[in-house]
Image: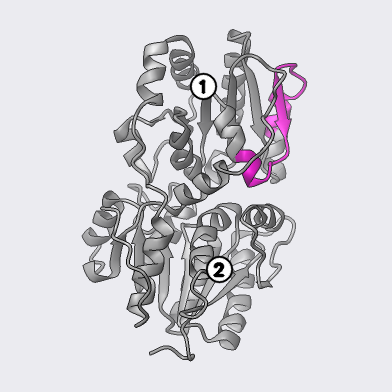
Amino acid sequence: MPHHPRPKALFVVGTRPDAIKTAPVVLEFRRYPEAVETVLVSTGQHREMLAQALGAFGLKADEDLEVMRHGQTLAQVTSRVLEGLDETFERHRPDVVFAQGDTTTTFVAGLASFYRRLPFAHIEAGLRTDTVWDPFPEEYNRRAVGLFAAQNFAPTVWAADNLRREGVPGASIWVTGNTGIDAVRAIAGQPGDPWFPSHTGRVVLLTTHRRENWGEPQQRIAEAVLRIVNDHPDLLLVVPMHLNPNVRATLEGVLDGHDRIRLIDPPDYADFVRLMERSHLILTDSGGVQEEAPSFGRPVLVLRETTERPEGVTAGTAKLVGTDGEAICLEAGRLLDDPTAYAEMANAVSPYGDGRAAARVRFACLRGLGVETPEEAMWA
């Protein structure tokens, strides 16, 4: 039974993707203040980028643990977040703790909930690759919270089936669509200035930050996109660079100084959505971008060896190319030079959601807490 006159839902975010995909759910819960109290807690794992992303939705954390330190290890992040969240849970005594996806913040929010026997609700549950080491440490994080999550909000049927195969009770699984689609649709509807209006040619967007691509793989990626730009005189390459100095050093070392390459600081989320919409082709090792770009009909080349989002590959909105330079150049060149190949990917139907995922999460979660709110039929 709830500890409070009305249930208290505590949402934990730590990174920009956490903020983007959690924001629609927080906003949906806050539409029903008479039914549920909603608290938003930031760990500060990616503090500046996190604040940017929340701000795009008019949100600000109710509490900030401020754990970020320069050069800290995963173990240090984990221990600081665990101590901060344990104290936070002691004060708030929430009836349910929410976290999204597969970040260190998500894993630790789950662990802190488990230690205090608090029900844990996992947004974007059930994503899997074939090995716990790839992506690192995200695959471990999402598998670990899957062991004890009381509510599993799977974005697709494939993700829900993964949970069932692992023995997760079916009664704790709901297929909602991905809340990231709610987010991108909400932001795309806002007014904003176009990107690079003076460039009349095509724009290619590159995002690469994933830990397993640091060093040599990222070097190969940078050298490949440089070749692609040089081979296509109409292209403008735009590279929002992650704040991590390891990432920046590699990208700047290869790409800085070219007159048709723009190395930029991470734009706020609203601007990034407009940048995706402006782009002709997107190369990324991000998970969220694989889901968001098909909303605009933009083909995605995935710069990873595995993906926990195979639905896009199956649907034809994305293609897995890895980090081999020749493979990247071959596949990008095919899409840039062959209008038929491009149209096949651009016109493929996104499998990731319809923009109502947050309402489904709200309905299922609150019903589980004994509170009735307007019903929302599950996505699949």
Residue 325: mark in rendering: 1
Element assignment for label 2: strand
Q: Quadrant of residue 62?
A: bottom right
Residue 302: percent from the left, percent from the top? Answer: 46, 33
Q: Earlier in the sequence, mark 2 or mark 1?
A: 2
What residue is at 69 percent from the left and 41 percent from the top?
A: 267
Which mark's residue is nearer the viewer, 2 or 1?
A: 2
Which amino acid, by three-letter code, is at mark 2?
Val
Numbered label tally = 2
Residue 59: percent from the left, percent from the top? Answer: 64, 62
Q: Is residue 147 visible?
A: no
| Chosen colour scheme | one colour
Element assignment for label 1: helix
Q: Quadrant of residue 249?
A: top right
Identify the residue position indicated by label 2 in the image: 12
Disc 2 versus disc 1: distance between alpha carbons? 38 Å
Depth check: 366 or 3 in front?
366
Q: Is residue 306 left or right of residue 160?
A: right
Identify the magenta region: 250-272
Q: Residues within 10 Å of mark 2 (few under 14, many from 20)?
A: many
Which amino acid, by three-letter code, is at mark 1?
Gly
Q: Quadrant of residue 227?
A: top right
Q: Residues within 10 Å of mark 1 (few under 14, many from 20)?
A: some
Residue 37: percent from the left, percent from the top? Answer: 53, 79
Q: Quadrant of the N terminus?
A: bottom left
What residue is at 41 percent from the left and 25 percent from the top?
A: 346
